[in-house]
Amino acid sequence: MTEPNHSPEIEPSGADLAQIEQELPLIEAEVLLLDAQIIVLTGDAGPTELDWQRLRRAQRRVLREARDLLAVRSAAVRAA
């Protein structure tokens, strides 16, 4: 990503927006993982088997999205 702009009147460039869009599936997966972790840690009666399944599913999704993003970036570097 380019240098961060701290001026409120400067909007992100098209390249910045494209990179954010490319990272969005990973960001969404990380949010779901955080939600699952919060539920496991704060459940009143302790985590249920369903809570643990949700956590494992979220972990796998983060790994899958991170792998896919890395593959896309690696292909772009090789093509450049």
Image (tube, helix red, strand yellow):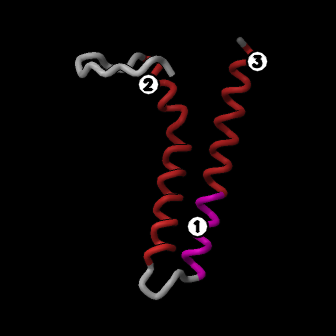
| Residue shown at 68% from the left, 39% from the top | 68
Rounded to the nearest angstrom, the CA distance separating label 3 from label 2 is 22 Å
Q: Residues within 10 Å of mark 2 (few under 14, many from 20)?
A: few
Q: Residues within 10 Å of mark 1 (few under 14, many from 20)?
A: many
Residue lying farthest top? 80
Q: Quadrant of the C terminus?
A: top right
Q: Main secondary structure of the magenta part?
A: helix
Q: At numbered mark 3, what does the secondary structure look like: helix, strand or loop?
A: helix
| Residue shown at 64% from the left, 66% from the top | 56
Residue occupied by mark 2:
17
Q: Can you say whether 74 is above or below 50 in the image?
A: above
Q: Relative to 65, is 46 on the left or the right?
A: left
For the residue marked with disc 3, what is the amino acid?
Answer: Arg
* x then y, percent, for residue 44: 42, 84
For the residue marked with disc 1, what is the amino acid?
Answer: Leu
Residue occupied by mark 3:
78
Reading the chain from its start, which is encountered first: label 1 or label 2? Answer: 2
Q: Which residues are magenta?
A: 49-59
Residue occupied by mark 1:
55
Rounded to the nearest angstrom, the CA distance separating label 1 from label 3 is 35 Å
Q: Nearer the viewer, residue 78 or 8?
A: 8
For the residue marked with disc 2, what is the amino acid?
Answer: Leu
Label 3 with label 2: CB-CB less than 8 Å: no
* x then y, percent, for residue 13: 40, 16
